[in-house]
Image (cartoon, rainbow, N blue to C red):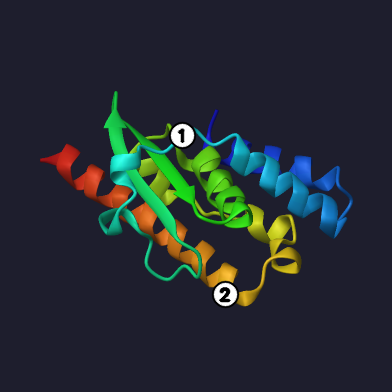
Amino acid sequence: MNIKVRQEEIIEEFGLLEGDLEMSINYLIELGDQLAPFPKNNKNDDFIVKGCQSKVWLFAQEEDQRVIFHADSNTVVTKGLVSLLVRVLSGHRAEEILNEDIYFPDKIGMGRFIGSQRSNGFSAMIKQMKLYALAINIKDKK
């Protein structure tokens, strides 16, 4: 399943909530609860995403020429946000991640249920994921 299809799934899921703010936030929290457990030894400053108001830990590894992301946060809403990005980007080739536009936040009206600080943090998460993909892409081309 490609990145666009995953984004469209998220748009459809949030569309079912018909813009209900409380249901959207509760759904985000549920999504965060489904995130794979994050390795405790990686919950350190080396894996903190800079620019997030909450603590967000993120790292990537390569498996079978695909980037696998692992993430966690100390707040439930932010954990839900990063889980959306993991869902969309994890399991794809580094080049795909680098070349794909992340458009689902605008389509689901994410700005309505996260403030500007979280929005900045969300952008920082995307940037960090793309940096991981870039590093893997460069390594693979050597």
For marks 1 and 2, the one nearer the N-term is: 1
The residue where tag 2 is placed is 117
At 39% from the left and 52% from the top, the residue drawn is: 57
**Image x and y of residue 76, in percent:** 61, 52
Percent x, y of residue 117:
57, 75
Residue type marked 1: Pro
Nearest the viewer among 122 and 134 is 122
For label 2, the crowd category at 10 Å Cα-Cα, with few meaning under 14, some 14 to 19 and many 20 or more, is few
The local secondary structure at tag 2 comes to helix
Question: What label does residue 64 carry, if any?
Answer: none
Query: The N terminus lies in which quarter of the figure?
Result: top right
Image height check: is 74 above or below 118? Answer: above
* On screen, residue 101 above or below 1: below
Q: Residue at x 44, y 65 (%)?
A: 124
* Residue receiving disc 1: 37
Residue 10: % across, % down? 69, 42
